[in-house]
Image (tube, rainbow, N blue to C red):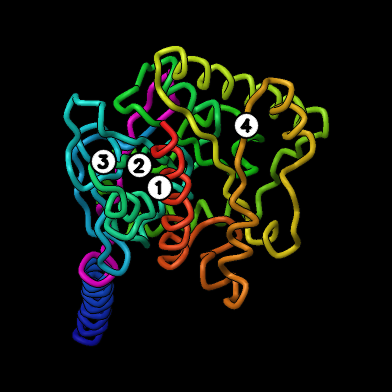
Amino acid sequence: MAKTINKKNIYIAYILFLVTLFSLFLITSELTLRKVFHLGSPVIYQQHQDYGYRPKPNQELIRLKGNKVIINNLSLRNTQNWSDNKLNKILFVGDSVTYGGSYIDNNNLFTSLIENNLSGYKVGNAGVNGWGIKNMSGLVVEHQFQPAIIYISLLIKSDFLRGKSQSYGWSRQPYLALEELYIHYYKKWKTNFKNKPIQTPEKIKTNIKESIVALKKMDQTLKEKGYTHIIIYSPSKKEVENNIPINSIIQKELKKHNLIITSLRKDIKSAAKNTPLNTFYYDNVHLTQLGHKLWATLLTKKLHTHINNQ
């Protein structure tokens, strides 16, 4: 009998030890993810039928490598709040390239650097991860979000191919940093291993046409109100390396709707002729900190030219 009791006690003690060890592992992991990797407090998004989704206003977060992600009162990725005065404001509208990612501090975004270079102007960043042209037009036209006098649509090829993206990221705070980590890798697994719907050539053409119709609507709406709208194409690393022009179908549709688009490809090629493109590109389309600095230089020149010609 004594031997049986001893075995039971040993078994219970062993289970308690494992539970304690696992609990300590979870607590240590949670604290490490929060304090070292700054997980557990992601940007929170809000949905709307006009524009799909965008960050909720008034957020200030410390994210990857201690970088600050600040969302102001108008849901722009700007450190300072914006007033109702439009006269000295420039607004960049775009996708994740414009938004910059959590690995870039607010102060190092090309929009922030441009503001430093343009005396008397405030430069807003309305870039949103995963957006396409329909989302951008939905914000500016349907939602009537027009807080500036100069608008720059900064586009990449994917923006013409997407429909109106409907959701992204977190709509609530995760309960744990571990939850954020799990969801991140689960989504990566789905992206890499789950079969994606294949776009047919006809579907691609349809998406391009519909996107450019939305871009034209945005262009007309802004210009009818006396605002300036400039369309800039941010090429991928592959497009710069191989001197690939803007997709011919996109060019044809833009010409059909009398839309002028300025590509940065030649400017980047010239500026980076003695520097590896990996210095400026984080991946094929997104930018490193030095990439944001270069884009700021190139875009400031174009804005200076436009402002001086007004």
| Residue 161: quarter of image | top right
Q: Residue at x 26, y 80 (%)?
A: 14
Q: Residue furthest top?
A: 224
Q: Which range is magenta?
A: 33-53
Amino acid under disc 1: Tyr
Which is in the foreground here, disc 1 or disc 3? 3
Look at mark 1 in the image and give the residue it sits on. Answer: 99
Along the polypeptide, which appears first: circle 1 or circle 2? Answer: 1
Mark 2: secondary structure: strand
Residue 82 placement (x, y as % from top left): 19, 34
Along the polypeptide, which appears first: circle 4 or circle 2? Answer: 2
Question: In the rendered view, would you say 172 is above or below 299?
Answer: above
Q: Quadrant of the C terminus?
A: top left
Closest to the observer, 125 or 293: 293
**Mark 1 vs mark 2, CA separation in Å:** 7 Å
Look at mark 4 in the image and give the residue it sits on. Answer: 260
Direction from residue 219 to residue 254 in the image, left or right: right
Task: Tell me whether circle 1 and circle 3 mark residues in contact (CB < 8 Å).
Answer: no
Look at mark 3 in the image and give the residue it sits on. Answer: 122
Task: Tell me whether circle 4 and circle 2 mark residues in contact (CB < 8 Å).
Answer: no
Look at mark 2 in the image and give the residue it sits on. Answer: 125
Mark 1: secondary structure: helix
Which is in the foreground here, disc 3 or disc 2? 3
Direction from residue 116 to residue 127 in the image, left or right: right
Q: Residue at x 43, y 43 (%)?
A: 303
